[in-house]
Amino acid sequence: MVYPRNKFDAETAKAWVGEGGMKQYFKVIPKPKPPKPRGRPPKRKARSTNKPPTEFNSAAPVPAPVPALETAKGAAPAVARFVDIENEQKKKKSRTNWGTGEHRIKLDKAVNDWSKKEGDIFDKNGEMIDNWRVFANKVNIPADTFYKYIKPNNRR
């Protein structure tokens, strides 16, 4: 049988290729999977912390304070304490500037005690503290900050 050149006839094509189709002559090759991305994985998006405030209904009844509890004679009554959360503010921690104010005085006293071997350099038993890190911990100064002021300066 000869395949017609100008017309496409499904019946004729099927008869020319055979009952199994092209699969009987060629092996089916599956499509390749896309390659995995190389390099550093993309950064994750930060979760948003800007949530809308919860609704506050001013018409809702405000809880009444708890009345004082009955106690034994002479004992102080227990009273419920309400805390205004909005007015409480957390104290923001900031960096300590050891070059000014009361911190400078504290640091100067510690450096003088260390260099002159007197004052706070002695522990509870009266023994001298030989380690500068232990001494800095005792006088509540960061060890690295204290070391900057007591180390020998070889560059000068």
Image: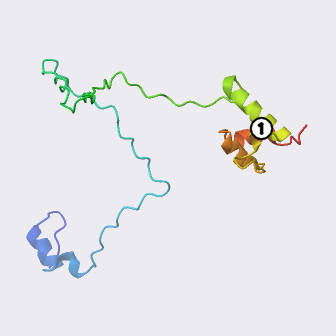
Give the image quarter of residue 136: top right
Q: Nearer the viewer, residue 2 or 70?
A: 70
Q: Position of residue 95 (x, y in %)?
A: 60, 31
- The image's colour scheme reads rainbow
- What is the residue that sits farthest to the left in this orientation? 11
Q: Residue at 83% x, 42% y: name it.
A: 117
Residue type (three-letter) at the residue carrying disc 1: Gly
Residue under label 1: 119
| Residue nearest the observer in this picture, 67 or 63 | 67
Q: Secondary structure at mark 1?
A: helix
Residue at left 28%, top 79%? Answer: 27
Relative to residue 101, is residue 150 drawn left or right?
A: right
Horizontally, residue 123 falls left or right of residue 56, namely right
Quarter of the image holding residue 90? Answer: top left
Q: How many dots with numbers?
A: 1
Quick check: 147 above or below 24?
above
Q: Residues within 10 Å of mark 1 (few under 14, many from 20)?
A: few
x and y percentages locating residue 24 in the rendered image: 21, 81
- Image check: 94 left or right of 34? right
Quadrant including the C terminus: top right
Q: Judge whether 118 appears above or below 32 on screen.
A: above
Residue at the far top in the pictured view: 59
The x, y position of residue 1, in whole percent, is: 14, 79
**Residue appearing at x 50%, y 56% in the figure:** 39
Q: Residue 146's image quarter?
A: top right
Q: Nearer the viewer, residue 92 or 113?
A: 113
Residue 15 point in image, percent of width and height: 12, 77
**Residue placed farthest to the front in the image?**
73
Taking the spot 20% from the left edge, 26% from the top edge, the residue there is 68
